[in-house]
Image (spheres, rainbow, N blue to C red):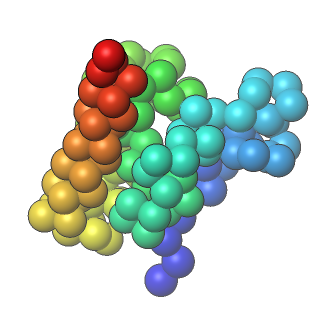
Amino acid sequence: MKKYNCWEFKKCGRETGGERSDELGVCPVASFLSADGLNGGVNGGRICWIIENNGCKDRLMHGKDFCFQCDFRYRVTNEEGMINICKATGFHLSNESNKKNQINEP
């Protein structure tokens, strides 16, 4: 079974080179390199719900908490399993925390 990235599933066209990327810009999820490979996705494509300021039109319409009710998030959770989702989320958050600490060190 193909593992879709959020932009493929939602058909937003905001991935790099996507049909709406010139008009609306590339979504931060599609260019989020530090999450590449998590849950089998490209960049942040399969962990979009934890990426700050993601460009999902549903999130923009319904608010930031909408991501936790999103049909794509449920699909990825079903495909990967909750334990793997938690591991990927923890891995991502740990890496982001380490980057911030390295930047803030004197």
Q: Residue at horizontal 26%, vertical 33%? A: 97
In the image, what residue occupies the spot 71% across and 34% down?
Answer: 26
Question: Which residue is at the front of the view, 100 or 5?
Answer: 100
Query: 44 and 62: which one is in front?
Result: 44
Residues 35 and 95: in front is 95
Q: Position of residue 40 (x, y in %)?
A: 44, 69
Q: Position of residue 34 (x, y in %)?
A: 46, 47
To which quarter of the image does residue 52 belong?
top left
Q: Position of residue 10 (x, y in %)?
A: 58, 47
Image quarter of the C terminus: top left
Residue located at (38% from left, 17% from top): 63
Q: Is residue 68 left or right of residue 31?
A: left
- State how many labels appear: 0
Q: Is residue 52 above or below residue 92?
A: above
Residue 80 in the image, given as x and y percentages of width and height? 28, 69
Residue in the image at 39% along x and 49% along y: 47
Furthest residue in direction left, as rendered: 83
Taking the image as shown, residue 98 lies to the left or right of residue 36, namely left
Residue situated furthest bottom in the rendering: 1
Q: Is residue 13 visible?
A: yes
**Which of the 4 image quarters holds residue 98?**
top left
Tell me if I can see residue 10 in this picture.
no
